[in-house]
Image: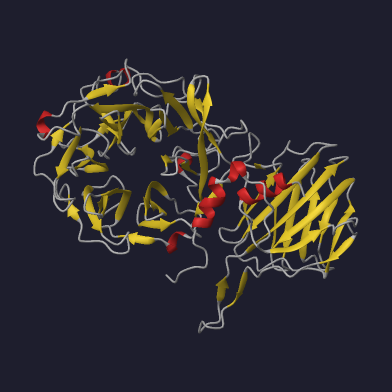
Amino acid sequence: MAATPDWRHAHNGREIPTESYSDQPYIVQTADGAWLCVLTTGPGHEGAKGQHVVSLRSTDQGRSWEKPVDVEPLDGPEASYAVALKAPSGRLFVFYNHNTDRVPEVKREDAGVYTRVDSLGHFVFKVSDDHGRSWSAQRYDIPMRKFACDLSNTYGGELCFFWNVGKPFVLRGAAYVSLHKVGAMGAGFFAQSEGALLMSRNLLCEPDPARITWETLPDGDIGLRTPPGGGRVAEEQSYSVLSDGSLYCVYRSIDGHPVEAYSRDAGHTWSTPRYKAYADGRLMKHPRAANFAWRCRNGKYLYWFHNHGGGFLRGLPEWGPYEDRNPVWLSAGEEIDTPQGREIRWSQPEIVVYDDDTYIRMSYPDLVEEDGKLYLTETNKDSARTHEVEARFLERLFGQFAATTLATDGLLLSLPAAGQPLPAAVAMPTLPEFLARDTKRLDYGTRDNRTGFTLEFRATFSALAAGQVLLDSRSALGQGIVVQTTARRTLEVVLNDGRTENRWDCDPGVLRRGQEHHIAILVDAGPKIISFVIDGRFNDGGEARQFGWGRFSPDLRTPHGAKDMLLAPSFRGTLRSLRLYGRALLVSEVIGNGRAGV
């Protein structure tokens, strides 16, 4: 596929070769300077026979890969969900599920069975002393202490269910490997789950793998679960080590929100889990999908999530909450001091990866930093890829909390002029073409320019009645843009190119009478998404709707309309300023504009 003019597009990533099924493409930087990717692959779909673990090496930052090496063979028992760790000596460890006993099926808690058997059996590891070119013939079992959820499963703990997607880490000389325990198989496959850690005090220094010792954390017989009153699903824990040695953990639920907790004693005990929130206190939203946080070399954090509330409690089928992992959003974090110790505050989100096919799901990422560049990996369960993240994007995102400058790149219109009142109308600048005819194609078909625009203004509403028009560039035939109030007491934008009409509105309850609001409408023609940022807060739907951002038609060519834009032609309030950009601003840039006060 030809490169698309947007670095965020999934197909601009570099593919990691797999057999067919592709999961958890995690990378370790080896002592000889290579990237070692361990992943789960196989000839069929997820959970099918032949699923096994392989590793691949790259010496050119993922541009090419050496021939895959089997950690476990294609014709062996199911081997799945590998994570790797490098010791200071350069020795590599790979940890994964292994159906050693060849269990053929498992009982559901609600009658019936599953024949998928990749999340049970033995949790094992192998080692490599040649930077991942080969792996030990022997695999080593990791003993796991049973929790209450194990003992109460349909097998009384004789057979335990578990898997892992969280990357290992090191704290105070000990190695830690995440484990997601499953107490019941049923609706949604894993019907009950919670997080645990496997800790080894001697893995990093013991030359004989058979002599490595393990301890299961946290203390007691209950792992990391959802907050009090939450659902039964708490899984895919991701850990970060803070600068003061505390542990931060974030994980998925089916409650519409990610969950987080902190440990101040190296994982033995944890704070009461809570739903994850932005720095402004609003709960973040996320479906049943991997959501990982990483500590970067600059001491700040990046958080991968999907920025909507899932569907489990909204009457969807049992697989509903696994949907809508596209696009991917990033939030930046930075440490702050609290009475309990260091914690992380989280920024407003930005889109980092997307696919044009909205049913495609991207997940199970990893983060790699090398030579001043930052890379993300991801998989859609068929293709795994690496993506270099644009430096400018990272600079804006990491700097969001301190942003105070006005963005000028792409500025087409800025009103009012110094010392002048806001006019009643203004000549409408030419907006970028979203779609155009590609005369280089033999069929003269579509060229998607991946452009966009941003409307930004300050407005005070005297009333929130429907039908008030703040901005209007429509022609007599209805082509153009209108920004108007709705019967839901919200503000909507309508885009019309004469062939298709699209609309989206801000979150209910955000606008207040008599209060000046800084409002930005981002029309991003890369992923074809409209979003609102009001008073520095990204509208994510809150409790009113699953999605705060909306998609517009990929056939929208660009909403050109009349030659003039009318300003506040029927607005019961005050429109104080207006800026129009010929690109979709980053949310971080909008926040900087708001703080600039102009």
Rendered residue at 46%/29% (across/down) = 260
Q: Quadrant of residue 408?
A: bottom right
Q: Is residue 202 left or right of residue 404?
A: left
The front one of 555 and 62 is 62
Query: In the figure, 508 relative to 436: above or below?
Result: above
Q: Quadrant of residue 195?
A: top left
Query: Would residue 426 be visible to someone looking at this image?
Result: yes
Q: Identify the coloring.
A: secondary structure
The front one of 124 and 389 is 389
Q: Position of residue 154 (x, y in %)?
A: 28, 23
Q: Quadrant of residue 236?
A: top left
Rendered residue at 31%/52% (across/down) = 22
Q: Position of residue 175 (x, y in %)?
A: 26, 32
Query: In the figure, 102 relative to 495: above or below?
Result: above
The front one of 217 and 223 is 217
Q: Is residue 560 left or right of residue 374?
A: right
Quarter of the image that includes the N terminus: bottom left
Query: In the figure, 113 relative to 473: above or below?
Result: above
Query: Would residue 505 be visible to someone looking at this image?
Result: no
